[in-house]
Amino acid sequence: MNQVKRAWRDLAVFGGQPAFDEPLHVGRPNIGSRRQFFQQIEDILDRRQLSNDGPYVQSFERELSQLTGVKHCVAVSNATVGLEIAIRALGLTGEVIAPSMTFVATAHALQWLGITPVFCDIDPQTMNLDPTQVEVLITPQTSGIVGVHLWGRPCATEALADIARRHNLKLLYDAAHAVGCSYKGQMIGNFGDAEVFSFHATKVCNALEGGIIATHDDALAGRLRRMRNFGFMSTDNVVEEGTNGKMNEISAAMGLTSLAKLDSFIAENYFNYKTYERDLADIPGVTLTLYNEGEKNNYHYIVLQVDEKQTGISRDQLILLLFAENVLARRYFYPGCHRMEPYRTLQPDAGLRLPYTESLVERTLCLPTGTAVSPTDIQKICQIIRFAVENAASIRAQLLHNTTILPTSIYESGDQTNCQTTAAHLQQFRQPHQK
Ligand SMILES: *Cc1c(COP(=O)(O)O)cnc(C)c1O
C-alpha cells in the first residue's frame, strides 16, 4: 500500500515510494462495448466494404446529426484534415484570425494551406477568443475567423457571429473538445459556417482517429463531401480539387460504440470533476477551471490554474512532483502556438499582443480523468497537491538543492496529444535524488 505523504522525503521525486504503481494519463482512451465493436468488425469484414462512405460511416454521421441537431455531419479521417477541408471549402485565403491558446493543429491547418494564422488573445473569463481583440486584428487580407471551444467551454458565439457578418468573414469553429457540449441550450455544432469535432483516441468519444464537420449549409456540405473524396461528384466525374479525408468503416464502428456509451463516459467524467472540485477546495492558489453546469458539458478536461505567488510552488514544480508520483499531468497548451515553429520565426512579435494567453499557458495544468481514473485515485492526487502546497517552502528548497531535477526535462520528447509517456521519462524520477 502506497502511504500518505507526511514529510517532503516521502515524495517520490526525492526518493519516496510513488503514490501510484501504474502511470495515470491525461487522455487515456475511453472504451465502449468490446462485444459491439467486435461484432461490427465481423460484419464489416463479411460485407467487404472497408471505406468509401460505407454503412457504418453513414450511421455514424446520422448519430452525430441526432446528437447535435445539425443537418449535415460529414465524417472525415481526423479533425485536422477536417479543418483543412472546411477551410478550403469555405474559400479562406490570406489571413485568418485564430487563438494561440489551442492545440497546434488549429494553426497548422491554416498554415498548411498557405494561410497566415493571425493569433488573437483570449478573454481571461472564457479563455477563448476575445471578440474585441478579433475586431482589432481585421485587415483587408482577413477572410475568416477560427474560434476554438477550448476544453469544451464555448466561445462567445453571438459576438463572433456579429463581427463575421459585419466584416463579411467566414466563421469556423474548432470544436475538437466539444462533443456533447452546449451553449445557451444549443448543442455545439450549430454555430458559425461549420464546426469540426475530433474523435481522436484521447478525446471524450473516440473513433480511434476521426473527425466530423458539422454544417447547416447544403451547398457547403456537398462541397465538403466531394473534397474529402478527391473532388468526385460521381463515378469518373471529378468536379473540383480534393483530397483523401475519408473515414474508414472500422473507425466509424469504433465511433458508434463510443457514442453508445457517451452518456456514461460523461457521467463518470462529471463524478470525477466533482470529486476534484471537492478535494481541491481551499487549497490556496490552486483553482479548478469551472464548467457552467447550466449547460451540457463533457467534463473531459480537469484544468487547474496554479498561482505561484499563493502556492509558493510553481506549476512546473508541481508537475514534476506529480510525474514522480506517476500522475502524468500535462501543460495544455504550453507554450502557445505562437511560440512554436514555424510561427515563432515567422511572427516573432505575436506574443506582444497576447498577454492573457502568455499568462494562462504558464499557469495551467491538466490532470487525469476519464473512465481509466477512479474517484479514489483522484482523492490521492488531490492529497499530493494539498501536501505540496502546504509544504511548499521545504519542497522548493529541496528542489533547488537537487539541481539534477529539471522541470522541463520531462517534456523533451513526447507530443501534446499522445498520452503515452516513455519509460525513460518515468525512470529518471524513480531514482533517488537525495545526496
Ligand atoms: C485534438 C485536437 C485537434 C486535432 O484533432 P485530430 O482529430 O487529432 O486531428 C484539433 N484542435 C484541437 C483543439 C484539438 O485538441
Image (tube, rainbow, N blue to C red):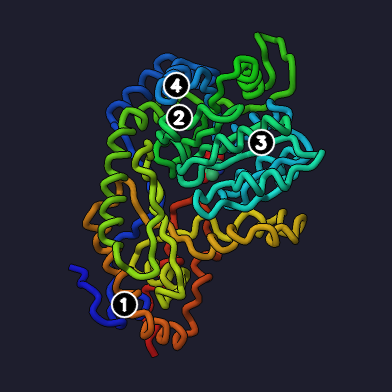
Q: Quadrant of the C terminus?
A: bottom left
306 vs 180: above or below: below
Q: Position of residue 374 (x, y in %)?
A: 25, 52
Q: Quadrant of residue 280?
A: bottom left
Bin the neighbour count of mark 4 within 10 Å (Cα to Cα): few under 14, some 14-19, many 20 and up. some
Mark 2, mark 4: which one is toward the viewer? 4
Q: Is residue 255 visible?
A: yes
Q: Quadrant of ligand 1?
A: top right
At label 4, the amino acid type is Gly
- Give the CA distance from mark 2 to mark 4: 22 Å
Which is nearer the eye, 308 or 425? 308
Q: Are marks 2 and 3 in contact (CB under 8 Å)?
A: no
Residue 318 as seen in the image, left or right of residue 363: left
Q: Quadrant of the N terminus?
A: bottom left
Q: Which mark is residue 56?
A: none
Q: Which residue is mark 3?
A: 163
Q: Which residue is mark 1?
A: 390
- Give the CA distance from mark 1 to mark 2: 46 Å
Residue at 62% x, 61% y is 355
At label 1, the amino acid type is Glu
